[in-house]
Image (cartoon, coloured by chain):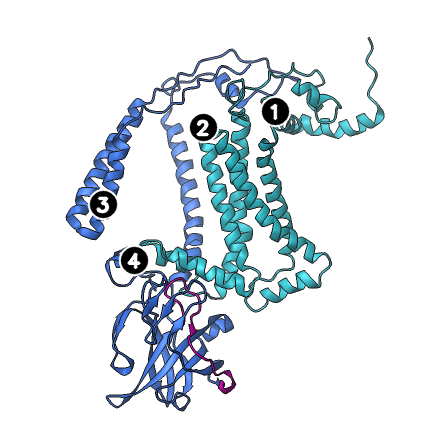
Amino acid sequence: MEPHRPETPHTPPPSLWPVGFAVGVAVLLLGLIVGWGIVLLGALLTVGFGFLWVRDVVEGTPTAPAAPEPPPPQGIGAAPVPARQAEAALPAMDEEEIHRYPRNVFLEGATLGLGALIGGIVTVPALGFAVLPAFVDQEPQGSDLGPLENFPEGEWRVATFLEDPEHGEVSRRTAFVRHNGDLNGVPSFTIISNRCAHLGCPTQPQGSLNEEDSEEIEVEHGTVTLIPTNPSGFTCPCHGGAYSIEGNRTAGPPVRALDRYEFSIRDGHLWIGKAYSVGEVEGEGKDARIKKYHRFYPGEHVDGIQQILYPFPAPNL
Amino acid sequence: MARRPPSLLRRIVNYPLDWIEERSGLIGGVRYFLFRKVPHDTNWAHTLGSATLTAFIVQALTGAILAMYYRPDPGTAYESIQKITNELTLGWLVRGMHRWGASVFIILMFLHMGRVFLYGAYKYPRELNWVIGVLLLVLGLFEGLTGYLLPYDQTGYWATVVAININGTAPILGPFLVNLLNGGADFGPETLSRFYALHMLLVPGAIFALIGLHLYLVIRLGVSSPPWSDRPAGDAMPLPPPSRDGARAGLVRPGARRRVRS
């Protein structure tokens, strides 16, 4: 019953243009590293070969002639007609045979246009609501870590605090805090985020955690926990990333040093501020020289040649 | 030869079916859907697709029931899961079905994909169905990712943190993806509700729609023969002569199935 299906698919003959297209893409990517001239060359190759490829595909495909068939017997009791046949059974109508009145065209356009307009009016705000809040007001306001006396000079504390009290416990973060002594008459702190620069697992201080001497400090929003520790570095339990005491990567898969926090001192309290990313720290303690980058997510390079892969940080509108 | 009048029971069953068929044509449609011609040398490997569909339906049903007791809030999610597992009657069973069924669904998708690949059933004219199948696979894996967070235990939490950050390493768009998945710059209260909405509304809806397309193409193009078949791919037995019993034929009449496939 089924007409014999042509076993040859309607595909164009083999062609080398896709290879040229792929080479163009490769050159373009290489150009991103080498320079803009190569990018331009790659783009030209890509567009040129892409055009040739598309032209081949379009011209090489024979248009399938629709063989008209006698309509199968219809009526009650007839076996259901396979879809392909049912389509073939429709009377063939050429576009030109149907006379189209201007009003007809207008009504069709108006229906489609109005439908699109209504659809857009409904969809665009919904999509915006789905996407935009994730990019608005994402800057934490800063958190109180408690009085300065809790941070003796030269000692490390593992501090957990609420990054955003409105969000509650789910925003509890951990940082390694060390008082470096005074720098130009102002106390200097090293505050390292515990978020691994590989994929964001929590790194641990490499050394004993003195949990008996841990302190819970009530601040304006929630509780801050401080656990004394004496680490020789930081390691991540997930994939074995290891960092020096200044947060520089020493081993494993992380792509940069551990992130750091800005800090300020208000009314004798240490306040943790904005987090920022660090490629590598030179020097130690208060003499450290740090190039600050916008805070990027784990696994994203901020320096070296790979930084071109992450040109834009997530916007904060 | 006079035909014996149908029994009372048969008339009772047939009457509503005829009523529906006369007004909708649905019975004939269902019959067309279920009693299609298939190649004579199909085998058990051809059942993997239906098995995957069954696994998905189990996931959809158990998931909808779990949603009656689950609370997608960072403070209470873990407790509600504990309650489902340990306190509510049969909760352990339904949660277990959903949890292990998820793995079954994923495994069956891959087996089905392997069957289609090894049998060459993705070739012309079925390429588009392969593409739809790959989309279904991606969405199924995404269901696995979003569902893993919902118990809100340490495993789920950190696995999700790592998974989101893996997305973050995508060139150029990575940082945007992280914000979209987190619902903010960092893992927060929105992350859980966002994953919950994706897991139980958006993605399953898309999967249902794509399964509809997938089945439509299976019916339109027919089931393909195995590569060792002596018939051209997809050729089936001829259709039976039209039934005189009209609309209800095949659904309730014993022997109809044999006749269709004869």
Q: CA distance from mark 1 to mark 3?
A: 51 Å
Residue linked to disc 4: A310
Name the side, left or right, on which B243 lies relative to A146: right
Using the image, tell me which numbered label, if any, was put on residue B123.
2
Q: Amino acid at mark 1?
A: Arg
Numbered disc 3: secondary structure: helix
The reply to whether discs 4 and 3 touch (Cβ–Cβ < 8 Å) is no
Name the side, left or right, on which B230 lies relative to B86: left
Image hue for chain A:
blue
Q: Position of residue A115 (x, y in %)?
A: 43, 40
Q: Main secondary structure of the magenta part?
A: loop
> Which is closer to the viewer, label 1 or label 3?
3
Quarter in which the C terminus of chain A is drawn: bottom left
Image hue for chain B:
cyan
The reply to whether discs 1 and 3 touch (Cβ–Cβ < 8 Å) is no
Disc 3 crowd rating (10 Å Cα; few below 14, some 14-19, many 20+) is: many
Q: Amino acid at mark 2?
A: Lys
Question: B226 or B26: nearer the eye?
Answer: B226
Using the image, tell me which numbered label, if any, was put on residue A202.
none
Residues in magenta, as a range: A195-215
Work out whether mark 4 precedes mark 3 in sequence or the reverse, and give the earlier one: 3
